Image (spheres, rainbow, N blue to C red):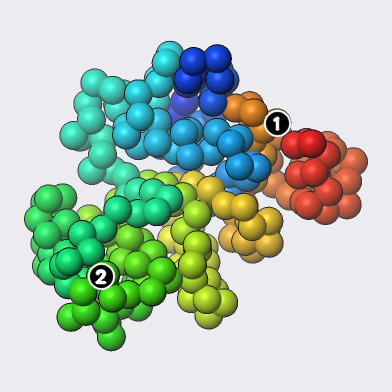
Amino acid sequence: MAASIKINHLRKVYGNNVAVDELNTDFYAGQVVALLGENGAGKSTLLNMIVGFLKPTSGKVLINGDNIATSPEKVKKEIGFLPEGSPLYEDMKVEDFLNYMSELKGTDRNQVIQAIRLANLEDVTSCKIETLSKGFRRRVGFAVSQLGNPPIMILDEPTDGLDPNQKAHLLGLIGDMGKEKTIIISTHLLDEAQAVANRIMIMHKGIIKIDGDLETITRRTRTISLENAFIKLTR
């Protein structure tokens, strides 16, 4: 199986700070990958380079064989991205905003209806985004990431601001979608990683310290839990 995302010697440097350091890895359809790390580990920097929002200092990202640096328009159609603190036009109504984003992405009205349903936004479609809670705003951002039914999803802190029921719903969706799509989620919540991911990467100071399923990680770190492994690798 060909990798849907292939990362070669990816590096990002800010002054004297190396945010991502010579990363080489592949991601495949059917994987839900949880990217874990403390604040400042380089997670968001990595995700922003994968989707083409941030230019690497060196190295490259291939999406289904195409370099995102040289074919950005083609590649970005393959990716649904939920950034941390997803930017929204707060003075727009939810449905109007989704229609607008759908037009920009070149998708049709049916995609908007589907995204509203997936994100459980039916009750707030006529509400202005500025009136919504943080959890609902996050769900609007998730709905945007679903427009066009992209085969690759990059989700940065997707459950931030959601209540327990909303988290359970979204994690269930991610798990179901991950049977066919390539999904990378960045999270601080270890229980979420264990609940939804079939592959876990722990990042520390720009380096992937370990990469594998939960059993592999605990065995290689000689620990009894993901929490203990995380502490051991990032302290």
Q: CA distance from mark 2 to mark 1?
A: 39 Å
First of labels 2, 1 by sequence position: 2
Which residue appears farthest toward the bottom when viewing the image?
123
Task: Pick the residue in front: 112 or 92.
Answer: 92
Q: Is residue 99 above or below residue 25?
A: below
| SS state under label 2 | helix
Circle 1: element type: strand
> Residue visible at 48% across and 39% down?
44
Q: Which residue is mark 2?
A: 129
Camera sees residue 62: no
Identify the residue shown where x is 55% and y is 33%.
42
**Residue hosting label 1:** 209
Q: Is residue 11 left or right of residue 76?
A: right
User: Is residue 13 among what the camera can see?
Assistant: yes
What x and y, as percent, mark residue 212?
Answer: 68, 41
Residue in the image at 79% along x and 36% along y:
235
Q: What type is the residue that disc 2 sits on? A: Ile
Give the residue drawn at x 40%, y 54%.
85
* Image location (x, y in percent) of residue 30: 49, 50
Can you say whether 108 is above or below 12 in the image? below
Quadrant hosting residue 93 = bottom left
Nearer the observer, 162 or 27: 162
Q: Where residue 23 sits: x, y (%)?
A: 55, 23
Q: Amino acid at mark 1?
A: Lys
Q: Neighbour class for label 2 at 10 Å: few (<14), some, many (≥20)?
A: many
Q: In the rendered image of this protein, does residue 74 appear above or below residue 174?
A: above
